[in-house]
Image (cartoon, helix red, strand yellow):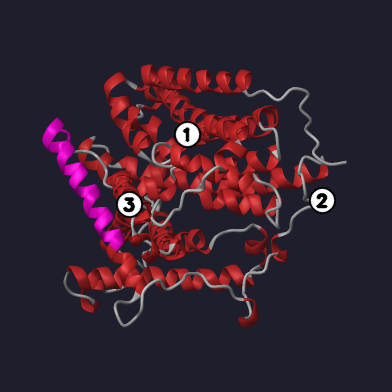
């Protein structure tokens, strides 16, 4: 057991120490990821692997990392997600006219995402109300954890942990959200790679002609092949560019905090999570910047690097701190709901996608499948596996859906309301409502955007 009290004293000292522990886990996982062939072929991200190592070293298995330290590490995701969401829209530049070019597939794809989001929470709530609560005494809020974990990912799950514990008095929700996020990530990666390899053989892919292999991707870049990951927009004599961008993120978070505070004062509801409102803060700052000379100081890539760093810490901390006893307690509801939702996700991917997308149906379907089992990064990873040179428009069309998707579902404002909706209506009634909304959207996009004489095969 690591004697934490002898190494770091005080809150700030402990925080630095906990981040250092996560750093060691990520470092070990990175070397394993680079050296172990299976991990490369399976596209397992180092952060997920680091979290699994931390879970094994934690208080439920080897007990190397004590429970009090793991509890603090488990609290990090709830704060890291605020940084991730604050960066979401900072530095984004609007592209005039791009939406008109892809209007059909953009609207159809947006419907795909919204329908799928309501499907995940609706199906899980129905199963909870009709099956799990009567048989296992499962809390009705269980119906919310799959959309939070699958479509929202580890970040949303971490961000909602305090809400589950403090507002709804159900601490298990935080651990179950992290668990479903891990399940979704694994289903997204392994399931997505399986689907891609089947699609290649059946000629569903538009450009990929041979099965994809994980060991073909370049993972370490020699000096001559390196590209800039960010750009300095302001002189170091004035301020370090990363510090400047971090300051902007801080302002976005403060705006989000003011919105949450104002909402509580006006409506008397204090259970709102901070992270979606930090994104609104970033959006407001970005609107101001894009209409002034401030836009010259914003580098989108720098915001993405900071966001990426926070996300790596977040995933590692979230997976490492999962409570194994809680997972074992809910193993049956977790297994049953995972099977049902994954079957429906594959249905959306392989049945609906070719019938509503005019161009590159498989590539547009696989990026959405990946994003709604894990995070957008998994979606783009699967897209790159099926379209290595990004020759299709799938990535662009998905990105155009972002402003009408990310702020609301898959971790946004609407996702944050799922527990409140279940509490208000009950799991069964809310499940019926959510499934009804999902089906309505599904039917609208199917009949209004249906591709006549569609073909599964995209190449000869």
Residue 86: within the magenta? no
Residue 36: mark in rendering: none
Question: Residue 66: percent from the left, percent from the top?
Answer: 30, 64
Q: Could you tell me how far apart the alpha carbons at marks 3 and 2 are, in whole angstroms?
A: 41 Å
Question: Tag 1 or tag 3, which sits nearer the N-term?
Answer: 3
* Residue occupying the point 18% across, 68% down: 11
Tag 1 residue: 332
Q: Residue at x 77, y 49 (%)?
A: 207
Question: Label 2 belongs to which residue?
Answer: 209
Rendering coords of residue 419 (x, y %): 31, 32
Callout 1–callout 2 Cβ contact below 8 Å? no
Which of discs 3 and 2 lies nearer the camera? The answer is: 3
Of labels 3 and 2, earlier in sequence is 2
Quarter containing the C terminus? top right
Magenta segment, principal secondary structure?
helix
- Secondary-structure class at tag 2: loop
Position of 67 with respect to 452 (left or right) is left
| Label 1, residues with CA under 10 Å away: few <14, some 14-19, many ≥20 | few
Q: Which residues are magenta?
A: 248-269
Spatial CA distance of label 3 from label 1 is: 40 Å
Indicate which label's residue lies in the foreground, 1 or 2.
2
Q: Which residue is mark 3?
A: 282
Query: Tag 3, which secondary structure?
Result: helix
Q: Nearer the viewer, residue 60 or 170?
A: 170
CB atoms of marks 3 and 1 within 8 Å: no
Q: CA distance from mark 1 to mark 2?
A: 40 Å
**Magenta-span inclusion, residue 251:** yes
Residue 275, relative to residue 57: is it above or below? above
């Amino acid at each position: 057991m690591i004697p934490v009290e002898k190494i770091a004293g005080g809150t700030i000292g402990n925080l630095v120490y906990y981040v250092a522990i996560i750093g060691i886990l990520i470092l070990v996982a990175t070397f394993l990821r680079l050296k172990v062939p299976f991990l490369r072929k399976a596209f397992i991200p180092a952060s997920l692997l680091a979290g699994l190592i931390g879970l094994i070293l934690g208080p439920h298995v080897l007990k190397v990392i004590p429970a009090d330290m793991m509890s603090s590490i488990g609290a990090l995701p709830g704060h890291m997600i605020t940084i991730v969401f604050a960066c979401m829209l900072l530095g984004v530049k609007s592209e005039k006219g791009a939406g008109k070019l892809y209007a059909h597939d953009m609207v159809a794809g947006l419907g795909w995402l919204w329908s799928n989001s309501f499907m995940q929470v609706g199906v899980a709530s129905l199963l909870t109300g009709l099956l799990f609560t009567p048989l296992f005494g499962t809390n009705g809020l269980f119906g919310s954890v799959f959309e939070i974990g699958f479509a929202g990912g580890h970040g949303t799950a971490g961000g909602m942990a305090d809400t589950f514990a403090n507002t709804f008095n159900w601490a298990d929700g935080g651990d179950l959200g992290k668990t479903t996020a891990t399940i979704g990530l694994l289903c997204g990666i392994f399931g997505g790679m399986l689907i891609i390899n089947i699609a290649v053989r059946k000629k569903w892919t538009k450009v990929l002609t041979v099965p994809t292999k994980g060991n073909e991707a370049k993972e370490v870049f020699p000096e001559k092949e390196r590209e800039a990951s960010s750009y300095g927009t302001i002189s170091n004599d004035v301020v370090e560019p990363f510090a400047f961008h971090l300051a902007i993120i801080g302002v976005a978070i403060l705006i989000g905090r003011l919105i949450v505070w104002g909402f509580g004062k006006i409506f008397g509801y204090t259970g709102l999570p901070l992270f979606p409102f930090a994104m609104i803060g970033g959006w407001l700052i970005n609107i101001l910047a894009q209409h002034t000379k401030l836009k010259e100081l914003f580098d989108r890539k720098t915001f993405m690097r900071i966001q990426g760093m926070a996300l790596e810490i977040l995933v590692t901390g979230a997976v490492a701190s999962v409570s194994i006893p809680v997972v074992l307690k809910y193993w049956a509801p977790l297994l049953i709901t995972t099977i049902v939702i994954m079957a429906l996700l594959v249905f959306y991917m392989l049945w609906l996608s070719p019938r509503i997308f005019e161009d590159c149906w498989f590539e547009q379907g696989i990026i959405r499948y990946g994003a709604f089992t894990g995070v957008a990064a998994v979606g783009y990873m699967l897209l790159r596996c099926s379209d290595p040179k990004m020759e299709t428009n799938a990535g662009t069309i998905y990105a155009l859906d972002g402003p009408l998707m990310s702020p609301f579902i898959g971790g946004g404002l609407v996702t944050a309301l799922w527990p409140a909706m279940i509490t208000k209506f009950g799991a069964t009634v809310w499940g019926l409502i959510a499934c009804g909304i999902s089906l309505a959207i599904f039917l609208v996009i199917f009949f209004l955007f249906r591709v006549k004489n569609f073909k599964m095969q995209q190449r000869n």
